[in-house]
Image (tube, rainbow, N blue to C red):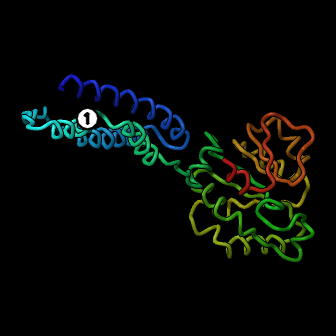
Amino acid sequence: MADNSKEDILQLIKRVGTFLTLKISNLSRHLDSRSVVAIAGIAFTVVFSWRLLRTPSGPQRRQPKRQTTTASTSGASGPASVNAASSGNNNPSEDSRTQNVIDEFFQPVKPTLGQIVRQRLGEGRKVTCRLLGVILEESSPEGLQKQATVKSSVLEVLLEITKYCDLYLMERVLDDESEKRVIMALEDAGVFTSGGLVKDKVLFCSTENGPMSFVRQLEPDWHIDSNPEIITQLARFIRYQLYISSVKLEQHASNVSTATSLEQFFGGV
């Protein structure tokens, strides 16, 4: 009986090892190494303890056989003894239940937005980003002469980027009033409340080449823009770029990613 228990434990360890290898390989994409090790240890402990509790604690005593007095009594004891013998064997469904316990414990973990942002940006810690068409609803400097509207859908992503990166926003404006409208719109949206972005990091210029000059001077790891010409010209100088547009670039460098919006890029992991 002891040998059988040892064999059961060894088989369980092998099965658990196989399951953990498959599950952890998927989870490790979104969790750090310490979290994976901790989860693996907890899972193994739970499953191992659960199986031990189901295993008989010691050898069962054999009940003395009763002498049958009649043939009918002897015949009735046949099926009962078969059932008693079969109950001592492992239930065929135990393997399935073991796998179910492990699968329930390792339900897919949905990564947080912060984790997605860090995964997408990788080691990039400095980011420059155009306002028009990316952060703002307006798509031209002329539109800013009337109003400036921050996209509500982009706020959560923008705040997560400011927690992880040194972020600079920039745009070309035609007058001082447009600049004030943009700053006020960003302030009303709560962009400056997190502490990651300050007004001094919102840059304005009056020329078409101004934003490109800002990017070249700041030398970011990532630049985000809605202007295809700027994206193309900066491809040789910036490590990574993100082009935001509903129309994809026909030809672009390997270091340029495309998305219909900022939140779509960080929500597609």
Which one is nearer the viewer's eye here, 87 or 23?
Answer: 87
In the image, 26: left or right of 150?
left
The image shows residue 49 at horizontal and vertical percentages of: 26, 41
Query: Please, what is the three-letter code of the amino acid marked with disc 1?
Result: Val
Whether 32 is drawn above or below 150: the answer is above
Which one is nearer the viewer's eye here, 142 or 151?
Answer: 151
Secondary structure at numbered mark 1? helix
User: Residue visible at 65% across and 44% down?
Assistant: 121
The image shows residue 55 at horizontal and vertical percentages of: 23, 38
Q: Residue 13 falls in which quadrant of the image?
A: top left
Q: Is the residue marked by circle 1 packed among few (<14), some (14-19), or many (20+) residues within 10 Å? A: few
Whether 255 is drawn above or below 109: the answer is above
Find disc 1 in the rendering and name its residue.
Answer: 82
Q: Residue 92 falls in which quadrant of the image?
A: top left
Whether 111 is drawn above or below 186: the answer is above
Whether 177 is drawn above or below 258: the answer is below
User: Residue visible at 45% across and 37% down?
Assistant: 33
The image shows residue 69 at horizontal and vertical percentages of: 8, 37
